[in-house]
Image (cartoon, rainbow, N blue to C red):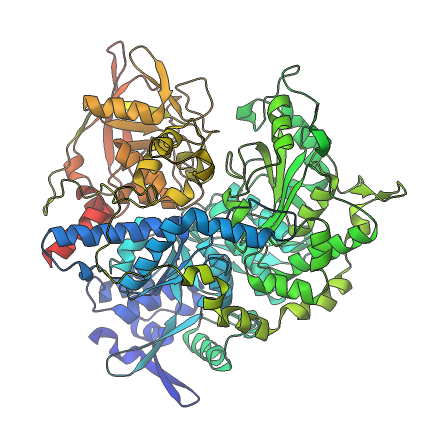
Amino acid sequence: MTDFADTIREFTVGARRLRYFSLPRLGVQVDRDLSRLPYCVRILLEGLLRQAGRAGFSAAHVRQLAAWEHDRGSDEFPFLPGRVLLQDFTGVPCVVDLAALRGALARLGRDPSAIEPLIPVDLVIDHSVQLDKAGAPGALEANVAREFERNRERYEFLRWGQQAFSRLRVLPPGLGICHQVNMEYLAGVVRVETDAEGRETASPDTLVGTDSHTVMINALGVLGWGVGGIEAEAAMLGQPIPLLPPRVTGVRLVGRLPPPATATDLALVVTQRLRQKDVVERFVEFFGPALDDLGVADRAPVANMAPEYGATSGFFPVDAATLRYLAETGRTAEQIEIVEQYCRSQGLWRGDGAPEPAYADVLEIDLSDVRAGVAGPRRPHDRIELPDVGRQFREALTAPADRKGFAVEAGRAADAEPAGAKGTLGHGAVVIASITSCTNTSNPALLLTAGLVARRAVERGLRVPPWVKTSFAPGSRAATTFLRKAGLLDALERLGFHAAAYGCATCIGNSGPLDAEVADAIRRGRLVAAAVLSGNRNFEGRIHPLTRANYLCSPPLVVAYALRGTVNADLANEPVGHDPQGRPVLLRDLWPSPQDLAALLPLAADPEDYRRAYGRIDAIAPEWNALPESRSAVFAWDPASTYIREPTFFDGFETAPRPVPDLVDAAVLAVFGDFITTDHLSPAGSIPADSPAGRYLVSRGVAPADFNSYGARRGNHEVMIRGTFGNIRIRNRMVDREGGWTAVPPDGEIVPIYDAALRYRERGVPLVVLAGRLYGAGSSRDWAAKGPALLGVRAVIAESYERIHRSNLAEMGVLPLQFPSGANAERLGLTGAERITIRGLADLKPGVAAAVEVRSPDGRASTFDATVRLDTPIEVEYFRHGGVLPYVLREYARR
């Protein structure tokens, strides 16, 4: 810090005097105009400046990033976030790993309590609740009760973690979705820390989270993004996250949204446009005159969808809208003044004539061109404008699967199928309509519009068809508060949108069971049934096993599609329904005017509602408070547990790493195409009874009714490795069969991928996976890398990777390799029957080429070069240690 000691400045708020490390002053020192840096780069630079001189942080890092230019540099720098955000699906395995580290350290004769988060960690339980009951009064209470029945073991474990780790705070079920709780309660925009001498230092609030939609907090001017659980654990334990100087794409927003377009529609347009542009591994920053009229609630869906457009972040700088949001959500006047003073002093404030940052490239989006639409039926960036939805659905019915179709053959699927008392279903029948997820239920305008559409529908005598399972799972308790105050909650409930949970629910695949008659009709008729939801993901097999067409849209459109009962329609021009006199009712007849909406919006801006919601957290879930507590520093693993088991990561652990052996004569476990998501690699939803994971649970005495979900079982590696590659819609090109199957040479027997991996392990054969573009898109789930690693996969060779999954592979000791430009498995003639050899793994360097030797079954040999996607020196070090967890354990053992 001696190099930059004179960058320390002060400002006062009331009687408080706060220090900060001044970026304008740094600019003078290094002779650079830092006001032209993207705001997100300035925040990263402040972290380097503030921590310069600490272990791993140098003055050279500060100067390197201060000299940032448009093109991405090659020298990594360290980033240590201010805090970590977890949710329970990804948080439980994080705490399991910390508990395993403590146990391993104790076995080495060291003090296990040395394993302790060094920065604050918040874990919000939001992913576990399932919609067993929906569309009826009492759904919320019934689902909460069932949640505690299913998850008691997990929650007792998290209660232990809350007591064992002093910096881990667990927020109980029923509070809301972690990203919305982060927006409304946890995030301060500016953090203030007190040092040993009592001095208070202000700095930007930064974080990483074990959920890819952590980026939603970027809407508030807080820089944060999703990482894998193992990377988050390393950050908790003081290991900086290695970053390369970011390539920042600027998105200039101009114009204003025309009614009836919503913030959801803007988010879907941004997702489509940025996927087309290809911003994978880039930072995206929004600027332009449209931000003056775009509040934080409207920015939130756009920031939230950054994983869907492939970016690391989608950042909105702090401005007057940020201060308004902080005031509306109950932050103190003192905190708001700290935010304003600090950001203005640091050059982190948007507006007041601040110069436009210099971006690597710029994309302009005119909000006045945005139209209402949906995204689907499989990918968030496949946007369809409302008049085209029905036509495109019909075209997809008979199109081949590799052309985004469903390949329904004439004569092999019914055009209509009776569902008993529920009516007659056809292709496109909406069997799930859910207002759900962090993405859109965080926006009062969207929910109030949905409520106004519902009220007009009730007034016109419309009803939701009986085959539609309706549900409402908002991201915050504040949502139902302002809907009730507006007099709209009753109308939503009369259409079946009763609050059924305050959690992720349908968006994560916890949509619960369909009515038995509806489910039977879908199976019997081989119908392509549909789900519509206000979520952020619609990947295959994610929402429900029986909905092959899944569409993302705004909350009011969820209500409209629920009323129509099918996606095989043009909602822009065809009736949503008919009134009791048989007269058609169009969507425009139900849609509120801007004046109607504006009259209600102040009801969602009462700070007392938010203070009450978060001022009684302990009273929200009395079942949580009644769970037993344990003060033991080391967790007592129960060998009979089917939820929480000590992982095998440290079996055979040695305090010094051995040289990494070459990969010789490896078998190909699977060959995948493009856009294989982490949902494909490690499902989060239901566990089929006839799957390897289902058979394991039955063998342990668990009835299928009590399987819960893969997401809830992530604390048990035995379940998770059996579910790896187990998505019902995954397609391995080695077999002509949908699902988690593969062929085992020499006779080509088709078996579950898990069973094949066991056979190879018994023979001592290592494994590789071949894949196409954007391998590992979607969620940050680390089990998508942990599972393959435990199955014996030593390397993945893909055309390209999504950011988080590539990092997860490296941190699990699985080598990510990239095909040469223009090449893939198909073009190289690889079928999966080959054997693969890669040498020199003990001495890899970031980004070098590795020679991949291929031997065909007939003995022919060939070679191609693949790029080593260990992108930084620390990733090479993690790989050399067999992963970041052994690396961290050796560091603690050495100390």
589 on left or right of 271: right
**x%, y% of residue 335?**
46, 78
Relative to residue 575, is residue 758 depicted above or below?
above
Q: Quick one: which residue is furthest to the bottom in this view?
A: 15
Q: Is residue 650 left or right of residue 581?
A: left
Q: Residue at position x 44%, y 39% from top?
A: 706
Q: Quadrant of the C terminus?
A: bottom left
Q: Position of residue 498 (x, y in %)?
A: 65, 53
Could one spot residue 640 in this view of the protein?
yes
Q: Is residue 71 visible?
A: no
Q: Nearer the viewer, residue 435 or 616?
A: 616
Q: Residue at x 23, y 32 (%)?
A: 850
**Towards the viewer: 439 or 528:** 528
State left or right for residue 636 relative to residue 302: left
Say above or below: 417 vs 25: above
Give the image location of residue 508, x and y in percent. Answer: 50, 45
Q: Number of numbered discs present?
A: 0
**Horizontal arrangement in the rendering, residue 835 relative to residue 511 (left or right):** left
Q: Image quadrant for the N terminus?
A: bottom left
Image x and y of residue 509, in percent: 51, 42
Residue at 27%, 9% in the rendered image = 858
For the point 27% across and 41% down, which residue is it? 847
Residue found farthest to the right = 581
